[in-house]
Image (cartoon, coloured by chain):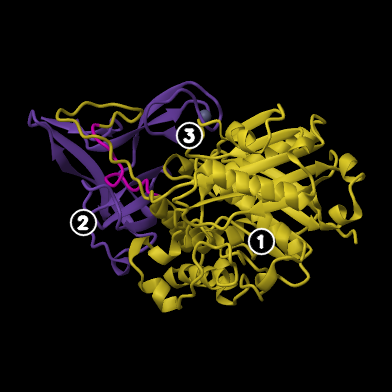
Chain colours: A purple, B yellow
């Protein structure tokens, strides 16, 4: 059994990220919404977010909670359909010389933990495309 | 605009560690110092505002009253992340403008002990995964889906600027910290007063690339306070009080308006640009008129992007601005001559009052070894993630 780390990661027929898109203005949000931060609208549609994008910014993080392996690469990706996504950059060395701003990246998933019932949590990250 | 408001008295404690004092002691020292400096007493105050973040539920303002005078005036305890101090100031300013007060006391205080700014998400992991929270997460996501840590968030803000503009990288960010550490050697109130070479800054332990340890502000204890007065009461003050008073030409607080990328990482730029623009309009001045700026350098990457956000350099020109030495004490627009948060320290609630103290002290010509010669106009900026941005522009009195 697998369960996504967060509910906006869809594993069935995926994996892909699913956003709530405002019917009024098209602004996209991850997670539960009450109303739109851009226009105040209250109606949303679920949309599939593009799996590919470019690296907008990053940091190589050396200090974290004990359960998190360091260093890791934190990143903001702008997907090809213009949605900002925050995640880790994976399958790349945590070395500023190996990471290029603007580089093409692609969504990927991996098992990040297993609970006492043997259920696996699946996380997503972006890897060089 | 409504009536002019002046800083009549100002004081700050040295920033650092105070294991033998509590936050009430620190706030009291700053409050009494500011009252004495302004030549007034607690009995003259019509309102008191007190900012602290980590003891926001403690009734800090009333605790201070119990030490310096329970006169029955209204107290507003405020908390607004790293903009807490600026919010305390603005609370008094709004009360005076509203005609409810002639004189008021604003205090900012924080005691952080040895706590770190790096506290991350580290939520308790359950044995059985169950989605919870707004994102239906089965465990803490900090460090898995990017970073929530402050050095990391501000590192990404800096690297985004590097992505959009040429000539910005690790070395430019490091030069910011080199400057602020050098400036702090002239400030006896700074938590650290030690100079470092650029190589030492770049070679210190990496926290969150490109921010090394020497490019991050420390935690610490301290307090600052200002006595503010409206123009009607100002007219009845002594000549000496009037000549040392500093005019508040602009006072602005903004929050972050919607931007697409703001869903994923805090946008520290738009609200700062909006606050700066509103402040320049209120004061009727331009960035090039400024004699000095104290801005929110919680991390070196933050200071660099705020050169641009505050209009101190051409759009996109922050890398060149630091490369040509413009923000050094003897440069075009001295920035953080106090040593900034990076070296002077950042007791969170105190910071937004302390930077107004710093600017006011220069405008009075009382800044000692670090005095910016001929200073007549200065700007103080803070930003708290969440987000809030406070900008105050101060002007020399011109009365002799
Ligand atoms: Zn909308």
Q: Secondary structure at mark 1?
A: strand
Instruction: Write down the chain letter for disc 2.
Output: A
Q: CA distance from mark 3 to mark 1?
A: 36 Å
| Residue B338 rendering spot, x and y as whole percentages | 60, 64
Q: CA distance from mark 2 to mark 1?
A: 43 Å
| Residue A67 rendering spot, x and y as whole percentages | 21, 46
Left or right side of A98 for B74: right
For the residues carrying marks 3 and 1, which lies nearer the camera in this image?
1
Q: Secondary structure at mark 2?
A: loop
The region drawn magenta spans B138-149
| Residue B276 rendering spot, x and y as whole percentages | 67, 51
| Residue B1 rendering spot, x and y as whole percentages | 84, 40
> What residue is pinned by disc 1?
B293
Instruction: Write down the chain letter for disc 3.
Output: A
> What residue is pinned by disc 2?
A91
> Which residue appears at 71% of the width and 60% of the height?
B361
The image quarter containing residue A97 is bottom left
Q: Is residue B332 visible?
A: no
> What residue is pinned by disc 3?
A27
Please tell me how many numbered marks the rendered image carries.
3
Left or right side of A67 for B110: right
Left or right side of B232 for B97: left
For the residues carrying marks 2 and 1, which lies nearer the camera in this image?
1
Q: Is residue A1 above or below residue B200?
A: above
Whether ligand 1 has any atom under 8 Å from the Cβ at mark 2 is answered as no
Q: Is residue B147 magenta?
A: yes
> Which residue appears at 36% of the width and 70% of the height?
B204
Viewer-proximal residue among B135 and B29: B29
> Which residue appears at 33% of the width and 42% of the height?
A50
């Amino acid at each position: 059994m697998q369960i996504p780390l967060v509910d906006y990661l869809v594993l069935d027929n995926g994996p892909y990220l699913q956003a709530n898109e405002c019917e009024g203005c098209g602004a996209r949000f991850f997670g539960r919404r009450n109303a739109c931060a851009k226009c105040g609208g209250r109606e949303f549609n679920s949309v599939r977010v593009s799996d590919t994008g470019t690296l907008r910014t990053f940091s190589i993080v050396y200090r974290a909670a004990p359960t998190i392996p360091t260093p890791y690469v934190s990143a903001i990706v702008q997907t090809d359909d213009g949605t900002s996504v925050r995640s880790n950059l994976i399958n790349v060395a945590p070395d500023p010389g190996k990471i290029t701003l603007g580089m093409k990246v692609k969504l990927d998933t991996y098992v990040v933990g297993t609970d006492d019932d043997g259920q696996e949590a699946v996380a997503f990250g972006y890897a060089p495309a | 605009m409504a009536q002019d408001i002046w800083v009549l008295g100002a004081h700050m404690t040295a920033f650092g560690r105070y294991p033998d004092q509590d936050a009430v002691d620190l706030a009291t020292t700053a409050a009494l110092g500011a009252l004495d400096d302004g030549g007034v007493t607690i009995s003259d105050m019509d309102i008191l505002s007190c900012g602290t973040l980590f003891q926001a539920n403690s009734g800090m303002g009333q605790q201070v009253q119990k030490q310096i005078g329970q006169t029955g005036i209204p107290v507003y305890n405020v908390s607004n992340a790293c903009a807490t101090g600026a919010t305390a100031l603005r609370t008094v300013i709004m009360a005076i403008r509203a005609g409810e007060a002639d004189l008021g006391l604003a205090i900012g205080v924080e005691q952080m002990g040895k706590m770190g700014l790096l506290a991350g998400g580290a939520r308790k992991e359950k044995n059985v995964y169950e989605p919870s929270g707004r994102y239906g997460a089965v465990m803490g996501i900090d460090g898995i889906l990017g970073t929530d840590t402050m050095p990391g968030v501000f590192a990404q803000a800096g690297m985004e600027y590097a992505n959009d503009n040429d000539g910005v990288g690790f070395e430019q960010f490091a030069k910011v910290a080199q400057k602020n550490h050098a400036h702090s050697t002239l400030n006896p109130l700074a938590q650290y007063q030690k100079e470092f070479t650029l190589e030492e800054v770049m070679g210190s332990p990496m926290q969150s690339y490109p921010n090394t340890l020497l490019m991050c502000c420390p935690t610490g204890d301290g307090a600052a306070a200002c006595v503010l007065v409206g123009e009607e009461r100002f007219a009845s003050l002594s000549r000496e009080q009037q000549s040392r008073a500093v005019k508040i030409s602009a006072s602005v607080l903004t929050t972050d308006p919607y931007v697409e990328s703001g869903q994923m990482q805090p946008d520290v730029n738009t609200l700062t640009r909006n606050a700066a623009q509103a402040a320049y309009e209120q004061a009727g001045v331009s960035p090039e008129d400024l004699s000095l700026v104290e801005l929110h350098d919680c991390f070196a990457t933050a200071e660099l992007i705020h050169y641009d956000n505050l209009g101190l350099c051409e759009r996109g020109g922050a890398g060149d601005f630091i490369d040509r030495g413009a923000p050094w004490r003897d440069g075009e627009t001295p920035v953080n001559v106090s040593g900034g948060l990076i070296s002077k320290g950042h007791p969170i609630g105190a910071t937004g009052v302390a930077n107004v103290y710093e600017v006011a002290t220069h405008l009075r010509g009382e800044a000692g070894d670090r005095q910016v010669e001929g200073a007549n106009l200065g700007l103080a900026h803070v930003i708290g993630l969440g987000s809030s941005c406070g900008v105050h522009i101060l002007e020399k009195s011109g009365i002799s």
